[in-house]
Image (cartoon, rainbow, N blue to C red):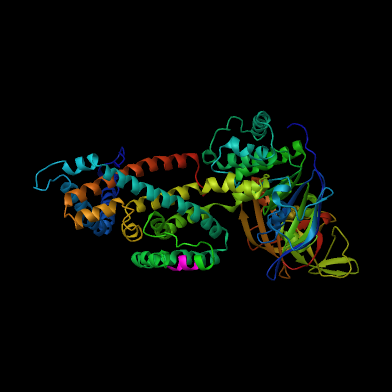
Amino acid sequence: MPAPEYADDSGATALNARGLRRDELRERLALLGLGAPAILLVIVAMAVPVAWLFGLSFLADDGSFSLVHYRRMIEQPSYARIFLATFNVSLLTTAVCIVLGYPLAYVLSQLPRRAANLCLIAVMLPFWTSLLVRTYAWLVLLQRQGLVNTWGMRLGLWDEPLALVHNLSGTLIGMVHIMLPFLVLPVLGTMRSIDQDYVKAAANLGASPTRAFWTVFFPLSLPGLFAGALIVFIICLGFYVTPAVLGGGKVIMVSNQIASDIELFFNWGAASSLGVVLLILTLLFLYVASRLTRLEHVLGEGGR
Amino acid sequence: MTTRAASVPITIRGVAKAYGTVLALDHVDVDVRSGEFLTLLGPSGSGKTTLLMVLAGFIRPDRGSIRFGETEVIRLAPHKRDVGMVFQNYALFPHLDVTANIAFPLKLRGVPAADIARRVEAALEMVKLAGFGSRRVNQLSGGQRQRVALARAIVFEPRIVLMDEPLSALDKQLRELMQIELRQLHDKLGMTTIYVTHDQREALTMSDRVAVIADGRVMQVDTPRAIYDHPASRFVAKFVGESTFLKVETVGGECRCAGVPLEVASSPAAGGAMVLMLRPERVRVGDGGRRDGHNVLEARVTDVIYQGDTYLVQAVLPDGGRISARGIASAAALGRVPDVGDVAPFGFDAQDAVLVADGAG
């Protein structure tokens, strides 16, 4: 921001102008100083490794520059299948999270604050236990001789043990369980910020509770739902442990392929190129989504 | 929309609502006449908004009866009551434009699209916002939002309109303009209107009658003039307008203040402690205060406050009571104002000296 030009900005009439400008500059530098450790951390722990991997992905096994890893990704249909599976699993997880999470968030938003916070702790509790523990817990519950199958058969709900794990459904159950709080929290935040007077006004104007929900409350909660779904989807794209443990080798996502490229084949170039492509696809997706959310902002403010 | 909508009387009987041990509404009885503009006036926490919310159906009272015309509505859901309401914060739907906001109640009532367009246009014209239909709510100023909220509340021609401090967010000049406009609109459409405010001047300006509410009870329901000139209690006198109170002895139909006999508007009622209420603008200070056959009290001036359009002289009587006089701040009048420390005569007419019950407050 350029300093404004005053007609008398010279000599004795420029009272303290120079000193005041210096104070302003010092304040900004102090602020920058506060942010410096975080900026340094991001550079060392994030920017440098990403750049390094980016470089690796363009090196052939003999160390020369080549596009061999990218060419392989295009030529071998198995890679396309992996990317498709990744987006497929992420989309399904997001959809199930919305179906389960939106009503949950709605109930929480309508409860008195204290009761809602207690329930929220119940939602968050699994969030605070190890992801690996939770994933193996699902394995125990869902396997052929697991709790779910034993009880289901004892209650006569089904006769044969259901294949609940080592497949897509097992992966989805595990991922939805892990991702649900990421959807509920932003949706709940948005719902809580919706002024109750909007719903009251709708009722006063003649809308039944159902009509008031769909014509007023739901549209106003959409920004939160959109944000939550986006977070869930993006995080799902990089999932590794859950599909590895609960997918039983049938659900291979990009992260699983990256792991096997490194662990089995020591092919850092192939792994890096997968990472780069996934990152680019994610950024592309985020860009499109952000255009859509901006549209959302134009369409309405989402309460106050 | 130039035809007058049918209006109905509202009968409120024994409406009570308790929050824990606190009675927010203490068996309220009010009769609102058909087509009347009635204001619920009270300090914050008095229960006036609670009563309005009970009328709209958003608060479920513990007991009582509310009739719109002949219909009992106390157990009717809000969306079936068919009353228009203007919320304090307007509650305009932020995801809809102005037209869609105003069309909202019409769509719910299954009005044909062509009629909706025509009626929305008419409503916008009525609140002087023609041409603003495609604006977003967040592109409107406070005053414009207020008008849209009003248009939305009247577009479906409800027989009853409720308003919850609709002007409190506006600046003073706009508020005074809107007071007049709201009142004109009411006179044009003729619906029964209940208006909540804590601003006594607003209540006096706009209303056919004012109901003063405190501690969940109706203290007095009367015309603005009667409320101001003959408040039923010390509380009402204090809350509506400026007032000073003088301790008086009432002996055998005669009224004395600090030993001086006074002529008052009404003869003192038997029993019950009474105080004499004076409106400062009806008290004259200085030699102009001395007139034949009128009340005069001598008091020592403690403060002279210049307030632009008027000045206020505060003084203390020999018995420790306080009296004030307010005058138009013309140059001539200011020249005659006594100095602080002077003992000056304070005069007032008999019909402006009102005895009121010395209740709490």
Question: Which quadrant of the rendered structure holds the N terminus of chain B?
Answer: top right
Q: How many marks?
A: 0
Is B255 situated above or below B87?
Answer: below
Camera-side residue of B176 and A238: A238
Seen at 68% across and 38% down, the residue is B181
Seen at 87% across and 59% down, the residue is B266
Residue B246 seen in render: yes
Seen at 91% across and 69% down, the residue is B252
Answer left or right for B297 relative to B254.
left
Camera-side residue of B76 and A37: B76
Q: Which residues are magenta?
A: A146-151
Which x, y percent locates residue A155?
54, 67
The quarter holding residue B264 reads bottom right
Which x, y percent locates residue A184?
47, 57
Instruction: Check residue A147 for magenta coloring.
Output: yes
Is B138 situated above or below A110?
Answer: above
- As drawn, the residue found furthest toward the front would be A159
Q: Main secondary structure of the magenta part?
A: helix
Camera-side residue of B202 and A291: A291
Which x, y percent locates residue B222?
81, 53
Residue B296 seen in render: no
Is B332 situated above or below B131?
Answer: below
- As drawn, the residue found furthest toward the right would be B252
Camera-side residue of B96 and A70: A70
Which x, y percent locates residue A117?
51, 65
Answer left or right for A39 relative to B138.
left
Question: Which quadrant of the rendered structure holds the C terminus of chain B?
Answer: bottom right
